[in-house]
Image (tube, rainbow, N blue to C red):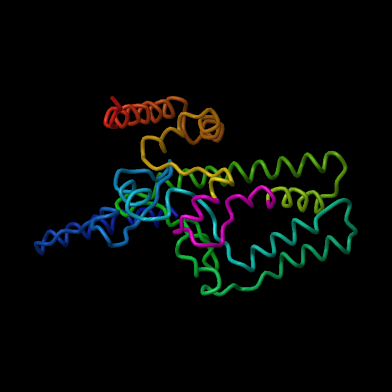
Amino acid sequence: MNLAVDHNVLLMDIMEKVAHKHDFRVLLHEKPYAGVNGSGMSCASIASAGNDHRLGANEAPPAIISVFIGEHLSNLLDDLEKNIKGTMSPDRKTELKLDIGRIPSVMLDNTDRNRTSPFAFTGNKFEFRAVGSSANCAGSMTVLNTIVAARLIRFKQDVDALIKKGTKKDEAILRVLRDLIAGSKAIRFEGNGYGDEWVKEAAKRGLNNVKDTPRALDVWQRDETRKLFTDMEVLSPGEMNAGTSRAAQLHAESADREPRSG
């Protein structure tokens, strides 16, 4: 992953140098021309002025982070949530585990048909279609990896807690998976992310739709964000303070530019 980020930055640098050598210019802006699709989305880890000019402004969908996993995997998760309940017999647990283990190789055209999703399962990986075209991906990958690592740690803690209460290991794992499946429903979306209907539906689900960089960066000032990165020892308290100070500055500058009534 680090290598891929390095390659991305090097490629942008080479493109600019080669273009300049031949009296051309490379436009890495997320939305260089009106009426032509741009590249990028907007949330706290990927917010930038360029992305602001794309989503929530000149293109849809707005900055609503959802996950597209395809009909097959969606049905599988729903079935698991429904069937994992109470004390299960050994045969039932074996059946559920086999169902998980028999996930077939999903063809790309079955899982990647939804090009409107910011976070899509594309056959053998998740693709994060959110970083701006001019951005360094390292910051976004740091945030994603921190979130995943924290979730895995919490997963083990929850499983261990059930085992300590007398639940068998395999059943404890299935129960925690059931809770995670149920908790993920709000962000799982199979429809058209470019439609106004999704904006309304996302609001009903309680999903964020932050439309500009200053407000997106406000997330760095939240107590839960600070706790996540300091507990995981990814950012020190001082580094978090530096980030929140910059976010506050941008927010204040944005407020000064907004028209006032009267």
Describe residue 151's horizontal placement relative to residue 219 as left or right: right
Q: Is residue 103 above or below residue 27?
A: below
Q: Residue at x 61, y 50 (%)?
A: 186
Describe residue 260's horizontal placement relative to residue 141 as left or right: left
Q: Is residue 258 above or below residue 205?
A: above
Q: Position of residue 140 (x, y in %)?
A: 43, 46
Q: Which residues are magenta?
A: 181-201
The residue nearer to you, when weighing 221 against 6, is 221
The residue sitting at the left extreme is 23
Residue 3 lies in magenta, yes or no? Answer: no
Q: Position of residue 187 (x, y in %)?
A: 57, 51
Q: Position of residue 36 (x, y in %)?
A: 28, 62
Q: Residue at x 52, y 66 (%)?
A: 122
Q: Is residue 156 above or below residue 191?
A: above
Quadrant of res 115: bottom left
Describe residue 161's horizontal placement relative to residue 207 as left or right: right
Q: Which quadrant of the rendered structure holds the C terminus?
A: top left
